[in-house]
Amino acid sequence: MNHHPPNTGPPTPDKQLEMMDTQEDTGGDDYGGGVEEELPLEGDGTRRRVSTRREDDHMNGSDNNSTVTVVATLPSPNTQATQQQPRANVINNHADQEMEDDDARSEATFRFVVSNFSKLKDTVLSPPCFVRNLPWKIMVMPRTQAPQQGQQQIQQNVGDRPSNRSLGFFLQCNGDSESASWSCNAVADLRLLSVKEGQENFSRKIHHLFYSKENDWGFSHFMSWNEVLDLEKGHIKDDTITLEVYVSADAPHGVSWDSKKHTGYVGLKNQGATCYMNSLLQVLYFTNQLRMAVYKMPTESDDSTKSVALALQRVFHELQTSDKPVGTKKLTKSFGWETLDSFMQHDAQEFLRVLLDKLETKMKGTCVEGVIPRLFEGKTLSYFRCKHVEYTSSRTETFYDIQLNIKGKKNIYESLGDYITMETLDGDNKYDAGEHGLQEAEKGVIFQSFPPVLHLHLMRFQYDPLTDSNVKINDRYEFPDRLNLDQYVGKREEGFGGSYLLHAVLVHSGDNHGGHYVVFINPRGDGRQWCKFDDDVVSRCSKQEAIDHNFGGHEDDISLTVKHCTNAYMLVYIREDSGPDDCLVNIKTVLDEVLEKDIPQDLIDRLQEEKRIEMFRRKERNEAHLFMMIQVVLEDSFAGHQGYDLYDQDKIQHRMFKVKKTSTLQEFLEHLAETLKYPVEQLRPWPFSLRTNQTNRTTHLDVEACLHRELSTISDNMNPWVVFVETVLPESGLRTLPNFDKEADVLLFFKYYDPKNKKLHYSGHYYMHISICPSEIVHMLNERAGLPANTELALFEEIKPNLVDRLNDLNRPIEKVLEELMDGDIIVYQRLDQLTDTTLELPSAKDYLKDIYYRVEVTFCDKQLVSDNGFVMELSQRMNYEQVARAVAERLGTEPYLLQFFRAQSHREAPGNPIRCAYEGTLKDMLVCMKPRQPKRIYYQQLSIRISELENKRQIKCMLMTERNKEEQELVLYPNKNGTVADLLQEARKQIAVMASGGITVGGPVPIITEPVQQGSNINNSLASNAKLRLVEISSFKITSVPSETMSLDTLTSAGTRTFRVEEVPAGEQPIADDEMLVPAAHFHKEAFSTFGTPFLMKIKQGESVVGLRERIQKKLDVPDKEFEKYRLAVVVMGRHTFLAEGDHINVGDFRCHSNQATLPTKPWLGIEHVNKAPKRSRYNYLEKAIKIYN
């Protein structure tokens, strides 16, 4: 992009430095500004807007760093400053000629010498220097900033030269590209070199993601123009300055980056949010011994779409042989994942555990059984050792990874030391040593052995109680390339530590809400050659990039090339030396090269065959526009069809033919004759077409005229094209089909209706001359129906759905009997005498077809059974409620009045509102509008009382809790609508008896219970015959009221979070004396609004000690002494709590409502403050779900 100086007024001195993107637009000029962070004023009064990361002492830290020197002379006025420059020559400063000349290098340093600097007026670009195969150029230009208010007049009076002119210094990437999809992340150091001995260079750092809309980045005011020209500053000599740029770039995305060429390896495609999976798959792939074991897993008989082992073999084989990034959709499909799972961020370590566990299970019973434990399994010894008695308890456990606490730790060694730190159990935390009782003891963990491949999980995500969420710890945490673990195992003869070499570093960028994973791997295990695997892009990197840059840390702890939120999350170390005795698993065996010849040939053949089939299908898809599908229907497909037209499009089995659109009709008939084993002259095609009256009928095709025409033209580009192919009947003895005169003949189809069995029978087709009367073919129809020849028939024309007319005068020509005579018309006939038979339910074909038109398949599902598939019945949409109930009751073997029906919800498969037994609509009205082809559902439940009686009752859902059964259980009660709370409690008592007996009571509704109760359950035992019940109202885990038994049920509402509970009144709470009171009690944590758990009612007494109350509450809650010591009691009024000291006494007046506490939510209650130990879902990451591999 060309940059022109802004047209501004006389400038004023301004030393403000601004980092900017020259393509942004601010204030009308072409330069704009992109600010990273504003720094405080420095000593010279300059406010710099630059990155706050500190400047590295040495930017050229990589071995493949290079320097390019370019000399540019200021062009003449007639020459465009941005003309095409020659490619920069690389001056090698190192011996490695091949590396220095590699355009794919990750970093470089190049210079641009600008002569005649004081006369510079336009933008000047340096020749390109190639890094990561992209051209990078230095862009330099004069910049002028508008003067501040009040300074313009002073400058005009004084006549000074504008002093706010500045040097614009930018780095441009891929500036000549027209592509809009590329991007490249880079850091750079922009320097103005000093020409004066002892004078430091002036530099500024940038960090930017370069892409098409922001392909240059730098500083619009790198240094004031006067400072550059000032010889004392030492930046100019002979009107010449030298600009230098050090740039370090990641491999670009969206350009033709050849990972295989530059690294020898390929990446994995990201499906949306599968970077975590891609990184782990690369780690497992480069664990060569595991890769070899995966290849050897027997998968010959596995389903290619569901076999995880085969899918992993496929991915590994493509990573080894492909030249392009490898897809993982087949792998995730084999996991049983849906598309949404691929767009959901998961934890990498969790995925690794699940995958290794699945592979270990799949390997059992095969030749590679035990490979995963041999590679990844270590052992620890957990122990308890008493100090004063001879008692020790220990247990050996295995692990596949070690989770290291990094908070407050500097490195791995400190974390491992913390892991095995011994803990002393004393005081209230003594160890229960069985027969020795509670003892002071030492608790700890000892590593018995480390696995050959050691996975270390750095716990960067930890729970923060202040924010009640997981947070990411970005603290600096160091890890070495070589790790010695001898000091962390038991005795040398018992355990084995050894020396480990760092093989892979899994890195996470972002926070706990999401981010991105990449992995750095040392494939050969030599500690020198590292590669960065960023999904589909693989690039070489330095050891420093792979290790040092991923320690993490805050802004002042890290260098320019490191992001604050980017740090190591998981480390993979491989043992260097051999184990004790016969243990030979070390880095040589783990990373032993896997060659093509090592892969089982059967597996290679299967994968190659899959590729061949895929290529064939891909070719088919690419050429699909050249072909058309022809669906051939033969006459035997019409037999058995019950309904309008000749066949049901959803049930018929077509014969499919895929032909080129350019094929002729003759070519298709020859192919059809060969397939059907008929001569061509015994075939005649009749295409189906959809008429305007929505019927699907055959039409005439002039075969002779269309024989050499293309099928696409004949079919009017219909795809698929449905054709009825008429054939010569074998029993006819004919060699060819009879001639058909399209002017005088008409093709008719016939159906015979049997009203006794209520069935239609297909009776074939017939070429009928239009002048022939229908009476002349009666004998033929009787013969086809198997009726006596003299049987009188009634004929009907099937015009369209729900429209069938009888042919009255059979002695007139067919062309006059049928008003719109066309090929493909359908005649339905039956015995004439049956039309007047009153014993028949559907005596005429017209009645039957009308009934067919209204017939619908309905699925009836039991409301009480979760995910009930139900049963299907074919019913008429004209049936009323009583007829539907009678039909369903007959199917279920019950009475119609003992059924209740519910509409289905339109948005999901669940029962909706009940249908009243007095419903006056039809079945069609009962069915909720469904999507096409979606099963039509109605839910039902069987009752023990009549539906008419049930509809006079009200359904109330509540919970049940008795004194002995503290767990709440759901009840659905049916008291009378005009009843009281006493009636509700009576219904509850009946249902409790039902639940205990496992049966149902006579004259009561079916109990609706969420959890099955077995015969003789403790519910009956816990509720005595004289036990009193009460109803309490609960909202937000607090009891808000206790409705009296005389209260009408109309006043009870369960809106929002309000629920009801039926509970047994404890004997100790009856009666309530004058100095006593029943108060609601609830659990809370820290704040009174943070309630949880099951609330209850507690009787308190005036003057009672708090100690005594605590004892009663502890007994009621059944909490151990040690745990209950942490509980605190409080009086909660108006949302504020006041804790009760143990020396206090209860004042009943504190719990009475006052004038300003008239509403229920503000009624005082007894609070029990303690930690909520019930598991709860984090309020964040609620879209995440546990990783599962289903197959």
Image (spheres, helix red, strand yellow):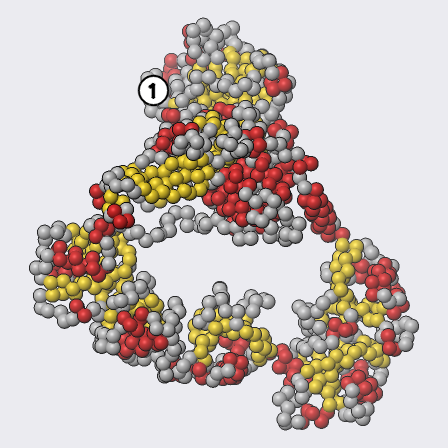
Q: Which residue is mark 1?
A: 42
Tell me, yes or no, if residue 623 can be seen here: yes
Tell me, yes or no, if residue 327 can be seen here: no
Residue 746 position in % (x across, y down): 82, 77
Label 1's element?
A: loop
| Quadrant in which residue 155 is drawn | top left
Relative to residue 93, is residue 129 depicted above or below? below
Relative to residue 401, is residue 1069 depicted above or below? below
Left or right: 485 in relation to 675: left
Relative to residue 495, is residue 197 depicted above or below? above
Residue found 89% across the figure and 75% down from its top = 738
Residue found 66% across the figure and 50% down from its top = 300
Residue found 60% across the figure and 32% down from its top = 592
Residue furthest out toward the right: 735
At label 1, counting other C-alpha atoms closer than 10 Å, the crowd grade (few under 14, some 14-19, many 20 or more) is few
Left or right: 655 in relation to 457: right
Relative to residue 201, is residue 422 depicted above or below? below
Towards the viewer: 192 or 414: 414
Towards the viewer: 1044 or 437: 437
Residue 55 position in % (x across, y down): 42, 20
Towards the viewer: 204 or 651: 651
Q: Amino acid at mark 1?
A: Glu
Residue found 43% across the figure and 38% down from its top = 402
